[in-house]
Image (spheres, grey):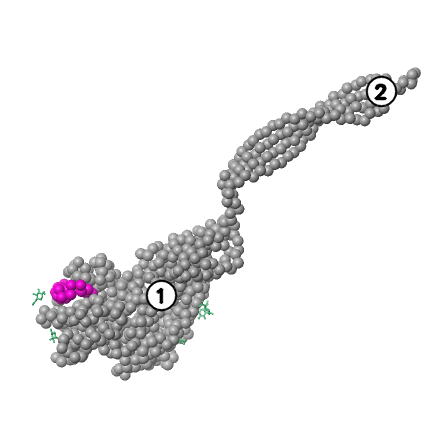
């Protein structure tokens, strides 16, 4: 990896970091056949960028008169404990529903609660009722307690007595509701026509003030509307009418939600799981959520289920309802809805479980409870005692296909590079990826000296001398007589180093030598008359110059010389997440570590394929706690197709846990499980723990998995704490 590729590595990391708000999905059937491409942003801008999901997000709503049936069974307790063991929060209990407006407290009554029709349909509650509830639920259970607004006899004196008795005898009592679905009172002939939101507000304020007088710290959950939002039965009207946090202790306002109704005949399994239909239904709560928040409170759906008026066989008790529950609750959480309480009756079609055999039904766990468990896994704490909460965002899809829903869940903890991902315990990660290192050649300023020498020799001039003598001589040899002179010359030049990390000083020294060479060349002539030899000597002198040039180069580095960065391919190596030494600082691609920026990282993703698939396997069309299917048998849609999903957003090379909420078909009432989870149907205890699969994120940050039509997949990165 050269500098070029380092740059592109940094750029792509930054790209993914800054791309925080871009959540998108691209379906590219044309290019990838049957595969669906989902891109989730790996980080959120900050912990305020998405709503935080309450740890007690799911609760159970039960009627006063049904409490003995539910509390005479371990199922509710076991299901609540299971949620708590995963998420660290305990599901809340809301005791209310239409029965709360039929309830009279009878202080000398022996029974906990009975239903009588004489003189009219009413529930009579005695003091042992509180003991029953107090003993069943753990002390940290928050109970929302429903009070009667309809029966105003004695200026609501019985309602106030009931509230005071609950406060005294039920330590788990947390909030009071006064009146159930007052927006239906006129229709139910409990109030005269023309009785509207402001009339409700006036009555509510009267009762709440009386309760407050007796119990100064009483907390209330007002509204409790069925949800038409007409005639002033909306939250901004209530706030204006005086039901507000300025006058009362109001942590939450509640409205009820059922996507379908058995009273109006619109029960339809196919529509129930349509993601876009759900979006439209939740949209109407936006002004209500805003009004609650503007008043300093939260918005809660304290009574909810698939089909109002007790549910509908073949819709509410099927696997479809479990998928709906996952989509619905996560969609609600993305809208900052505080909590959702699912309404249950001991034998109703929409109950999440049958606590005790009755009315021809056997005790057992219904499909929706598997949806609750799947959600508990999605919100499961990364470690025991963790303070992590999850932020949830919807991943919106171009063209909004109705058959797929995707949610990203982020940890509210800012993950840090080099973070020890499991708290204080060191954890080893294996890396086998090429990494780029900066190598320090020297870390000290230094001086380097180099010397080079060269010799230049040349002839400067030549002179001749002649002399004559008459004698007999022997011929002499050439003699050279060198003579020396020396001239020194020094010049120094200084230039900046190319690297800019020091100076180069060049010192040039010239040493010049002079040399004379004399050569004597004799020539001999003989006289004819005398026979004498005349010797003539010719002396040649040459002046030579010889230059020796010495160049001394002195490189003075005022800064350390650092070699350029280059890449090394490291063999797989175990890094300790607590090791902070520079040389093995974990890289972005190391398992268990994060890019070199702090951030709020994707921790979980939920993908639901809501494409409708019915089964024709009659052995799964009923369950022991369900009513038989009616009509029996319905066509299937043929082959159950599977889609390959290619999802990005998790950290490269991380290993993810994969869980599936699966069932034989939308219409099935049994054979449903979350990665093999099974319950004891009599007690609700887990008899077979889920066996999650695992899947690796590749080095580009992509995971690929298959999802069946009508199935939900949960991916969990356990390294995001
Ligand atoms: C798409 O899925 C169907 C049924 O599962 C299969 O028959 C078909 O070959 C798949 N097409 C591609 C392009 O993979
Ligand atoms: C009911 O109680 C309220 C306040 O406690 C009081 O203002 C009102 O007069 C009472 N109404 C009757 C009919 O007693
Ligand atoms: C209304 O409450 C009174 C007690 O205040 C009780 O005697 C009466 O039976 C209740 N009526 C109904 C219809 O519940
Ligand atoms: C399954 O895929 C095949 C091939 O794409 C298609 O013809 C068939 O309608 C699909 N079945 C369902 C139930 O979607
Ligand atoms: C959901 O699954 C069906 C059946 O496999 C498939 O045809 C459809 O494309 C999937 N939807 C998306 C959006 O992936
Ligand atoms: C879980 O459900 C799948 C699909 O319906 C089924 O194949 C599998 O046998 C079930 N496992 C258990 C333990 O019930
Ligand atoms: C699936 O079965 C239900 C009955 O439980 C039926 O109402 C629905 O129309 C069927 N859906 C499809 C797509 O066949
Ligand atoms: C991952 O799944 C494979 C089988 O698919 C299993 O052999 C392996 O033990 C699993 N690893 C972990 C860490 O759960």
Q: Nearer the viewer, residue 171 or 56?
A: 171
Q: Are marks 2 and 1 in contact (CB under 8 Å)?
A: no
The residue carrying mark 1 has its beta carbon less than 8 Å from ligand 8? no
Identify which residue, 683 or 46, lies in the foreground: 683
Residue interval drawn in magenta: 198-225
Q: Earlier in the sequence, mark 2 or mark 1?
A: 1
Q: Position of residue 449 (x, y in %)?
A: 58, 38
Residue 531 x/y as whole percent: 91, 18
Against 51, residue 444 (above or below) is above
Q: Is residue 508 left or right of residue 250?
A: right
Q: Position of residue 160 (x, y in %)?
A: 13, 69
Which numbered tag is attached to residue 384?
Answer: 1
Determine the quadrant in which ligand 3 lies. bottom left
Residue 72 shown in magenta: no
Query: Label 1's element?
Result: loop
Residue at point 27%, 80% (across, down) = 356
Q: Nearer the viewer, residue 706 or 252?
A: 252
Q: Is residue 413 visible?
A: yes
In front: mark 2 or mark 1? 1
Tell me if I can see residue 186 in this picture. no
Circle 2 SS class: strand
User: Which image quarter: residue 529?
Assistant: top right
Q: Residue furthest right?
A: 529
Residue 3 place in picture, x, y as percent = 50, 49
| Image point (34%, 63%), residue name | 386
Q: Say how many tags the image has.
A: 2
Marking on residue 535: 2
Quadrant of the rendered image containing residue 245: bottom left
**Lateral position of residue 598 relative to residue 355, left or right:** right
């Amino acid at each position: 990896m050269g500098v070029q590729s380092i740059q592109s590595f940094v750029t792509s990391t930054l790209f993914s970091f800054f791309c925080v708000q871009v959540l998108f999905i691209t379906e590219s059937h044309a290019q990838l056949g049957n595969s669906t491409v989902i891109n989730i942003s790996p980080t959120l801008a900050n912990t305020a960028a998405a709503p935080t999901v309450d740890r007690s997000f799911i609760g159970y709503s039960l009627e006063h008169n049904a409490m003995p049936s539910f509390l005479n069974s371990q199922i509710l307790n076991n299901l609540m404990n299971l949620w708590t063991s995963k998420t660290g929060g305990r599901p809340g209990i809301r005791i209310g529903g239409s029965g709360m407006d039929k309830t009279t407290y009878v202080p000398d009554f022996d029974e906990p609660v009975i239903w009588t029709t004489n003189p009219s349909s009413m529930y009579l509650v005695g003091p042992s009722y509180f003991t029953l509830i107090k003993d069943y639920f753990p002390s940290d259970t928050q109970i929302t307690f429903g009070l009667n607004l309809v029966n105003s006899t004695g200026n609501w004196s019985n309602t106030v007595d009931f509230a005071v008795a609950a406060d005294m005898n039920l330590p788990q009592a947390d909030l009071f509701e006064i009146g159930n679905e007052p927006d239906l009172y006129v229709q139910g002939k409990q109030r005269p026509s023309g009785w509207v939101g402001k009339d409700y507000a006036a009555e509510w304020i009267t009762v709440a003030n009386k309760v407050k007088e007796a119990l100064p710290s009483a907390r209330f959950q007002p509204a409790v509307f069925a949800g038409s939002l007409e005639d002033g039965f909306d939250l901004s009207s209530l706030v204006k009418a005086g039901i507000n946090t300025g006058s009362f202790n109001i942590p939450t306002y509640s409205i009820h939600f059922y996507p379908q109704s058995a009273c109006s005949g619109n029960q339809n399994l196919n529509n129930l799981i349509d993601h876009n239909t759900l979006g439209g239904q939740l949209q109407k709560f936006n002004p209500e959520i805003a009004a609650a928040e503007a008043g300093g409170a939260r918005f809660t759906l304290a009574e909810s289920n698939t089909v109002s008026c007790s549910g509908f066989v073949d819709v509410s008790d099927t696997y479809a309802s479990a998928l709906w529950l996952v989509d619905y609750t996560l969609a609600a959480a993305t809208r900052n809805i505080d909590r959702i309480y699912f309404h249950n009756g001991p034998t109703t079609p929409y109950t999440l479980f049958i606590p005790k055999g009755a009315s021809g039904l056997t005790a057992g766990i219904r499909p929706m409870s598997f949806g609750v468990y799947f959600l508990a896994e999605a919100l499961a704490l990364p470690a025991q005692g963790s303070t992590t909460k999850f932020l949830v965002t919807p991943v919106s899809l171009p063209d909004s296909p109705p058959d797929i829903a995707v949610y990203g869940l982020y940890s509210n903890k800012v993950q840090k590079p080099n973070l020890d991902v499991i708290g204080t315990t060191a954890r080893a990660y294996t890396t086998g990826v090429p990494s780029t290192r900066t190598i320090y050649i020297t870390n000290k300023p230094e001086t380097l000296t180099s010397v080079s020498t060269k010799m230049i020799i040349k002839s400067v001039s030549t002179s001749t001398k002649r002399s004559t003598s008459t004698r007999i001589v022997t011929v002499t040899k050439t003699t050279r007589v060198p003579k020396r002179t020396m001239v020194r010359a020094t010049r120094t030049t200084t230039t900046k180093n190319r690297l800019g990390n020091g100076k180069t000083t060049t010192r040039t020294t010239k040493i010049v030598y002079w040399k004379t060479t004399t050569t004597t060349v004799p020539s001999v002539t003989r006289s004819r008359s005398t026979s004498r030899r005349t010797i003539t000597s010719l002396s040649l002198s040459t002046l030579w110059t010889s230059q020796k040039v010495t160049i001394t180069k002195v490189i003075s580095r005022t800064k350390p010389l650092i070699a350029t960065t280059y890449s090394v391919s490291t063999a797989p190596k175990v890094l300790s997440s607590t090791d902070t030494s520079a040389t093995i600082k974990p890289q972005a691609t190391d398992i268990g570590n994060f890019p070199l920026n702090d951030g709020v990282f994707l921790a979980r993703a939920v993908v639901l394929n809501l494409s409708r698939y019915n089964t024709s396997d009659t052995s799964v069309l009923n369950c022991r706690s369900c009513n038989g299917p009616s009509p029996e048998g319905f066509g299937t849609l043929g082959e159950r197709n599977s889609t390959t999903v290619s999802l990005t957003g998790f950290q490269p090379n991380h290993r993810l846990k994969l869980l599936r909420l699966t069932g034989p078909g939308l219409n099935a009432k049994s054979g449903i499980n979350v990665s093999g989870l099974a319950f004891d149907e009599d007690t609700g205890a887990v008899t077979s723990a889920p066996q999650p699969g695992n899947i690796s994120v590749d080095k580009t940050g992509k995971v690929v998995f298959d999802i069946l039509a009508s199935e939900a997949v949960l991916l969990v990165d356990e390294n995001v704490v």
